[in-house]
Amino acid sequence: MDSLRELFKVGNGPSSSHTMGPERAAKRFKAENPNAASYKVELYGSLALTGKGHLTDYIIIETLKPKSTEIVWMPEYVHPYHTNGMKFIALDNEGNELNSWLVFSVGGGTIMEEGQQRQGGSRVYSFGTMAEIMSWCEKNKKELWEFVTENEGESIWYFLDQIRTALEASVQSGLSKNGILPGTIRLQRRAQSFYRKARNDKSRGGFVGRIFAYTLAVSEENGGGGRVVTAPTCGAAGVIPGLMYALKEEYNLTNEEVLKGLAIAGLIGNIIKENATISGAEGGCQAEVGSACAMAAAMACFILGGSLEQIEYAAEMALEHHLGLTCDPVGGYVQIPCIERNAAAAVRALDAAQYALYTDGKHSISFDQVVKTMGETGRDLKEEYKETSLGGLAKYQFDGNC
């Protein structure tokens, strides 16, 4: 499996695959073709179908400035390697092709070339399944976060502390804003009003309200093109920081406890990325919000004192109950149903953790089995339900009074 450094990335929303990935590709192509007079970029499949709402054309054009860029939308062409394909073309003064590069944004801001191994290219981790990792932990009397240190080295904690800081900053930034999110939907930000209602409520309802508020804050920040962390994607960026921020506040957690929880969350995300997918264009929203919910559930279960078996159970349950979830962003924006879905998943992650804590950790379906099933389900989903905005809720039009 890859390093957690390849899972958690800091950047601007609204989409890790449609915004962050193309931006990284554009930067690389620009650096490699400094003598180009202009550029042309062809966008394929899902990248073309929802690129407008995800600001794909905007970020590519801005990145390739001051040279001019022509964007060619080709939604009808789906490359067999991945639906999020794009071809960068460097042109001379007469419009002749100097160079071209076919590249794919495969989820979580990661870019790859055709033929490149999709899973675990850097092979930082010695094992790739939960069963193997749990066996190692049991044999060596270690916890999951210690397995992360074993494979990543001590430097991973400095990196994770940077990620923690960025996650908290995204909550705080989102809470400070109100008004309408950009786009034709004209969706109203709600995080600030949720927080005002929840902050003085000391009941369980107030705690849940704060989880909602913090998760909405990050998801709205992402929907507005703000700075977030892929956890594991931009579309699911609110789940982990929303729950993490609320748990830290509720239980007065130290940063060290939070970092261990983040390491475990990252490990769960890596297993999913290795054995299935975290790309909504490839697997539907089960691959994005479902994965984030599993990561957050494992994090919460650890923080609340769960055993190795209970942590695995919490992650399994959280992913299992998102199986088949479609990716159907209205208008191509990461707003409806994405923002509410993040908030609901953050609370579901806590529920999964608490449920697992009431058990001895024994259960029938393993996390690895659910991950495999999620990958199979994603392949079976109709294309209309995989970030194309051609099916599901995306078929409906909204009048801008949301």
Image: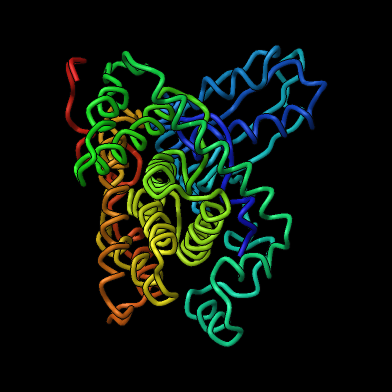
Which sits in the foreground, 157 or 402? 157
Residue 304 drawn at (x, y percent): 38, 61
Which sits in the foreground, 195 or 392? 195
In the rendered view, would you say 216 is above or below 253? above
How many numbered discs?
Answer: 0
Q: Is residue 279 left or right of residue 88?
A: left
In the rendered view, would you say 90 is above or below 281? above
In the rendered view, would you say 301 is above or below 258? below
Which sits in the foreground, 233 or 200? 200
Q: Residue at x 48, y 67 (%)?
A: 275
Image quarter where the C terminus lies is top left
Image quarter where the N terminus lies is bottom right
In the rendered view, would you say 25 is above or below 192? below
Q: Residue at x 44, y 58 (%)?
A: 299
Q: Is residue 146 left or right of residue 19?
A: right
* Colouring of the image: rainbow
The quadrant holding residue 336 is top left
Residue 137 drawn at (x, y percent): 56, 80
